[in-house]
Image (spheres, rainbow, N blue to C red):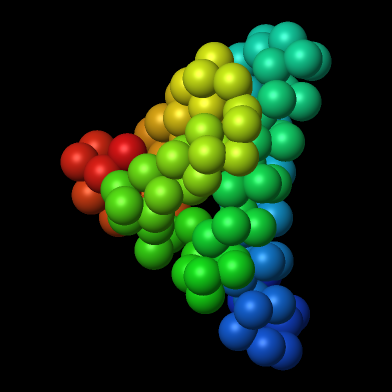
Amino acid sequence: MARKVLSRCSSANDQRVAVSTELVESFLRSKTAKNCSASTIASYRTDMKLFASHVHAIDLDLAQVQRRHVEEWLAGGLQAGLAAATVARRFRTLIQFYAWAHEEEEVPEKIGRAHV
């Protein structure tokens, strides 16, 4: 799925954004099909959009993320004054996303298991 999107983009950043967008939307469709509530889907969408923006800002795509990138993003949220519950929810979103992406063979095993 993500590989097809690459052919439609010109720059490396455009490619990262397009692939990330398609991966996130596919993840959300999967969660919707599993009967997640509308508010859960909305939270997943917001969390993933924010995380993808952070990842793109450091010139990575979602498949290149390592544990330290997740930790930096979550720590930044705490330093910015986010509630611990919000940061914990964002972490759970990333766990859900990377588990799904690994099952779909969109990210390496280390992302889905050891790093997140």
- Residue 35 percent location from the top left of the image: 67, 11
- The answer to whether any part of residue 96 appears in the image is no
Closest to the observer, 39 or 75: 75
In this rendering, is residue 14 above or below 88?
below
Classify 12 as above or below 24. Answer: below
Q: Residue at x 61, y 28 (%)?
A: 82
Q: Quadrant of residue 100?
A: top left
In the image, taking residue 68 as reference, residue 12 lies left or right, namely right
Q: How many marks?
A: 0
Q: Residue at x 59, y 21 (%)?
A: 83
The answer to which quarter of the image holds residue 75 is top left
From this view, report whether residue 42 is shown above or below residue 49.
Answer: above
> Does residue 105 lie above or below 60 as drawn?
above
| Image quarter hosting the C terminus | top left
Expressed as whole percent of the image width and height from the top left, the position of residue 58 reads 51, 70
x%, y% of residue 55? Answer: 54, 60
- Residue 9 in view here: yes
Where is residue 10 shown, x and y percent of the image? 72, 89
The residue that appears at 67% across and 66% down in the rendered structure is 17
Q: Quadrant of residue 52?
A: bottom right
Q: Residue at x 47, y 39 (%)?
A: 74
Q: Which quarter of the figure is the N terminus placed in?
A: bottom right
Is residue 86 rendered to the left or right of residue 99?
A: right
Give the camera-side residue of 46 and 7. Answer: 46
Indicate left or right for 38 with 74 as reference.
right
